[in-house]
Image (spheres, rainbow, N blue to C red):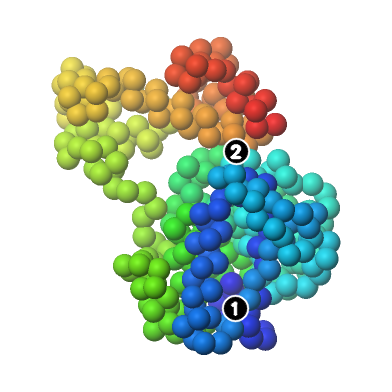
Amino acid sequence: MRLNYQGPSPEKVGFLLLPQFSMMAFFAAVEPLRIANRIANRPLFDWILISTDGGPVTASNGMTLMADQAKGEVHHLPTLAVCSGFTPEAHLNRPLMAWLHQLDQVGCCLGGIDTGAFLLAATGLLKHERVALHWESLPAFRERFPGIDTTDELYELGERRFSCAGGAAAMDMALEVIARRHGAKLAIDVSEQLIHDRIRTRSDQQRMALVKRLGTHNRRVVEAVALMEQNLEEPLALEEVASRGDVSVRQLQRLFEQELNATPRQWYLQLRIKRARRLLSETDLSILDVGIACGFGSSSSFARAFRAYYGYSPRQVRQKTA
């Protein structure tokens, strides 16, 4: 999926499917290529499904796809997209790392769909790159790879690397590839076939506007929640949140209970605990480090708050994803 592909036609794209990969993101990437072939009435793109051992791979939704080849049978490939799920690095090992490096050395354009960027980063193949990830995965990635530039934009398309936020963003990235290779008219025709009302640019927002997510237009509530989301590692005192919104703590409390059916303290704690759940699932940070990254002063206070919210402990999450 590089910017200026000059290889043979059809352009071949490999998809490395790892256990629990996102089926939605995979299909969103493949279907535009298939439709482009049909509309053009000639094979512009070809694709191959790869697994680590050549066997079938089960996605996060429980559906299973058959692989065309094992990774060890693939030695040259113009483009490879790594497709993974909630615990991407659980499937990373030395043979897989070596294979990815070998493909890179022979000129393969490597990219990650959804959490696939975690594996490429852990393999050392995303140095000096800008990486797009799903907004839920961004905190975990930034904790795990602080030296890599990240963005919450829909996708990034470079000369030798690409990444996208997963889900429908994979469709937008594929449509951009089609436009760059074969013209905007074909990309628009493909988009219309997909009932995709417009091709989003990479800078479009991933998340629904905060007003829509919260279901309220109250300016003070929206601004307070935005402030909370920006300050999870070092939580602000509620007095500070209220002050920045030019309201009293009592007014803020009344507004939250009225608009969100929760107190500001409950809402803030919920944001921090949900972020902790993602870090526990997607990184190998210690439980203490996860707690600190989410604003808890000790592992005991973190564990108590986490258990009170979810009904199970941080350690149980870590054991389940191990």
Closer to the camera in the image, 202 or 191: 191
x, y percent for residue 184: 41, 81
Q: Quadrant of the N terminus?
A: bottom right
Instruction: Using a 10 Å C-alpha cutoff, classify the residue at mark 1 as few (fewer than 14 neighbours), some (14 to 19) or many (20 or more).
Output: some
Can you tell which quarter of the image residue 73 is in?
bottom right
Q: Is residue 242 visible?
A: no
x, y percent for residue 239: 27, 21
Name the side, left or right, on which 97 lies relative to 161: right
Does dot 1 land on a helix, a strand or a loop? strand
Residue drawn at x 30%, y 34% as measured from the top left: 225
Residue drawn at x 32%, y 48% as measured from the top left: 208
Q: Is residue 43 visible?
A: yes
Q: Nearer the viewer, mark 2 or mark 1?
A: 1
Q: Quadrant of the C terminus?
A: top right
Residue drawn at x 27%, y 22% as measured from the top left: 262
Closer to the camera in the image, 241 or 169: 169
Please name the residue that numbered disc 2 is placed on. Answer: 282
Name the side, left or right, on which 219 lies relative to 119: left
Above or below, 122 against 143 in this view is below
Does dot 2 land on a helix, a strand or a loop? helix
x, y percent for residue 57: 69, 51
Can you tell which quarter of the image residue 319 is in?
top right
Please name the residue that numbered disc 1 is placed on. Answer: 45
| Gap between marks 2 and 1 measured at Cα | 33 Å
Closer to the camera in the image, 135 or 291: 135
